[in-house]
Each structure stands twice: as structure tokens, then as C-alpha cells.
Amino acid sequence: RRASRRTTIRRASGFPATLTSPLTVTFGSNSTGENAFLLGPLGPVQSQYVVPPFSTPVASAYYRDYLAGPVNLTASSSLAPATLPAVVDPGPLTQFLVLLPGETAFRGWPSSNPTGKAGSPAAQNAGLPVTTTVEAVDAYFNRVNYGGSVTYITSDSPSFQGVAPMSLGLSSYAVTFYSSGSQWVTVSHSTGTPPSTFSSPISIMNGQRSDALTFVHVSPNLGTAVQGQVG
């Protein structure tokens, strides 16, 4: 998301100042996402601006941030700094983010992390539920407000797992794999938008051994005499 920022250099009285020498203004942000200050709407990147003397005491820049949320923008120089609170809104819905145990969302860093995820799926045992989380996100993996329902399908058999509601762009469902090996989850929305999305591959191990013995059928009962049987 981009926005124009304009900084006016003023006297303590509030009126614009007259500079008698060049003034270097440095723009900054406390965002934890990938961000930059630009000379124009599309660049180039430039975080420092020199205001010439005896000119209009204004430094202008465009701010680009890929992480949605509140942010403080600052302008500092040899004069008193200035701070501007702002809010970066998420973009339109473009995709689903499917998270398995061991993965977390990593938003707002498209250059260094185009998957929007941190970590990798932890291996799971066959026959046990695996919580799958689905988020409706923009192109930079910021969650957006979205409703409807989500269908969960696995690469295993039976493939259909169930349908769960989505509220405020978030849905969760426990799927179960029955076959060992590399498996994955596919999710789709009731409206068909965005398109179906695959999870990262997850390693499924053989089910855990049970130490309990279960008698399914015993005949005849050892304490019952049966006609024609000796012993």
C-alpha cells in the first residue's frame, strides 16, 4: 500500500520557516513489515531528502508498506522531529493461507518470504486429528474480513473431511490422515473465490502401537462345558 507524505518545516510559532542553509530530512517508520519511502509513486527508494535554502520548506515522500496495521511515520533532522500516526489497510482478497501445526503466518515480506509462512509442518501420526487453519488474505498475506464456509479435502482416502464456517477471514478444522507418507490438505470456499489452495506437504507416520489387548470374539467360553467336547 502506498501513501503520500508531506512534511512542512515550521517555526515554533507554527509559520513556515525560511532556511538559510540546506536541511537533510530523514523519514522513518516503526513498521515490522517490508517498507520504504519513495521519491515518486513507483520509486526510486529514497529515505533522505535535502531541502535547499531559501525554498519552500517542504519535504515530500511516498510511503510503501506491505504489512497492514497501525504505524508511526517520523521525520527527523537537526530540528525537532515530527511523528505522524497512520494505518495501513489490507488489500483485496486474493488467496487463502493454509497453516498446519508447526507453521505460523509471516505477513508483509513479499521479497524475502513469498510463501507468507514461517516454520514447516510437524510430522503427525496416522489416525490422529491434525488442526488445519485457513486465513483469507491479500497478496501480502494480511488477513481480510471474509465469511462463508470452507471445504477441507486431503490427499488421503477418504479425501473429504468436512466443511467449517469462516468468520472474519479465519477458519479451522481437524482433518485426519490414515495413510503414512507425504500428504497435504486442499481447501476451497463456498463461493469458489479465491481458487482452491494447497497446504505445504506434511509427513504422516504410522499410527502409534497400542499395548492393550482387545478380545473381539472368544468361543466357546472357557468356563462352559460343551456337549461332545472333552477337556
Image (cartoon, rainbow, N blue to C red):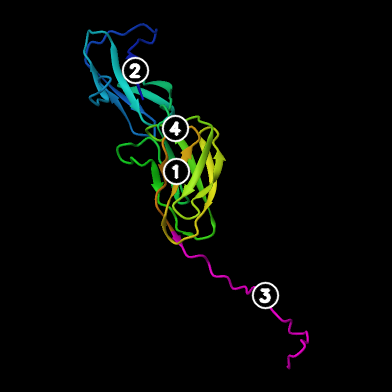
Judge from the rendering whether residue 196 lies leftward or rightward of residue 209; answer left or right.
left
Q: Identify which amino acid the numbered label 1 is placed on.
A: Val
Judge from the rendering whether residue 87 lies leftward or rightward of residue 174; answer left or right.
left
User: Quick one: SS at disc 4?
Assistant: loop
Within-10-Å neighbours for mark 2: few <14, some 14–19, many 20+: some
Q: Relative to 133, is 84 above or below? A: above
Whether residues under marks 1 and 2 lie with C-beta atoms below 8 angstroms apart, the answer is no
User: Quick one: SS at disc 2?
Assistant: strand
Within-10-Å neighbours for mark 4: few <14, some 14–19, many 20+: few
Residue 165 position by quadrant: top right
- The stretch in magenta equals 204-231
Residue to which mark 2 is pinned: 5
Within-10-Å neighbours for mark 3: few <14, some 14–19, many 20+: few
Judge depth for marks 1 and 3 and give the one in front.
3
Mark 4–mark 1 Cα distance, whole angstroms, equals 15 Å
Judge depth for marks 1 and 2 and give the one in front.
1
Mark 1–mark 2 Cα distance, whole angstroms, equals 36 Å
Name the one closer to the observer, 43 or 22: 43
Mark 2–mark 4 Cα distance, whole angstroms, equals 35 Å
Instruction: Answer with mark 4 or mark 3, whichever residue precedes in sequence.
Output: 4
Q: Residue at x 40, y 46 (%)?
A: 118
Q: Relative to 226, is 113 above or below? A: above
User: Quick one: SS at disc 3?
Assistant: loop
Instruction: Answer with mark 2 or mark 4, whichever residue precedes in sequence.
Output: 2
In the picture, the disc for residue 193 is: 4
Name the one closer to the observer, 39 or 73: 39
Residue to which mark 1 is pinned: 98
Q: Residue at x 53, y 67 (%)?
A: 208
Whether residues under marks 3 and 2 lie with C-beta atoms below 8 angstroms apart, the answer is no
Q: Relative to 130, is 143 above or below? A: above
Name the one closer to the observer, 202 or 70: 202
